[in-house]
Amino acid sequence: MPEIVCPECGGKLQYWKEYLITKTQMILPDGSLRSSVKTSNPEIETMQGFECKRCGWVFNTVNEVNFDGVEHLMEWLVNHEGELKV
């Protein structure tokens, strides 16, 4: 398997994943906001990917534009799915 580094500059990569949470706050009839805020449980989105800490190169798995040259990153993601804590 190829080394897991940035395909542009060889820098270190970090893995990232986006989550969606919703915060809601009631508006009272007089227009003021209720002080309590409800927060939903995080919903896991499919937006995830890799970013280079050196040059800023970013690959996200949602665009699925062109996996040429990054197939090994997708394989790494599948192989480490149970270990990812982000």
Image (tube, rainbow, N blue to C red):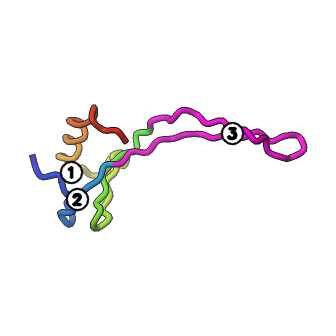
View extreme (left): residue: 1
Is there CB contact under 8 Å for labels 2 and 3?
no
Q: Which residues are magenta?
A: 16-44
Amino acid type of the residue tagged 1 in the rendering = Val
Earlier-in-chain disc, 2 versus 1: 2
Q: Quadrant of residue 12?
A: bottom left
The quarter of the rendered structure image containing the N terminus is: top left
Looking at the image, is 86 positioned above or below residue 65? above
Q: Please name the predominant secondary structure of the magenta segment in the image.
A: loop
Q: Position of residue 67 (x, y in %)?
A: 24, 49
- What mark, if any, has residue 70 been given in the picture? 1
Q: Give yes or no for residue 27 being in the magenta stretch.
A: yes
The residue to which callout 2 is attached is: 12
Q: Residue furthest front?
A: 35
**Among the two numbered marks 2 and 3 on one chain, the one whose residue lies closer to the N terminus:** 2
Distance in Å between CA atoms under marks 2 and 1: 14 Å
Q: How many marks?
A: 3
Q: Which residue is mark 3?
A: 37
Check disc 2: other Cα within 10 Å, few if <14, some if 14-19, many if 20+: some
**Residue type at tag 2:** Lys
Question: At 60% from the left edge and 39% from the top edge, which residue is drawn?
Answer: 22
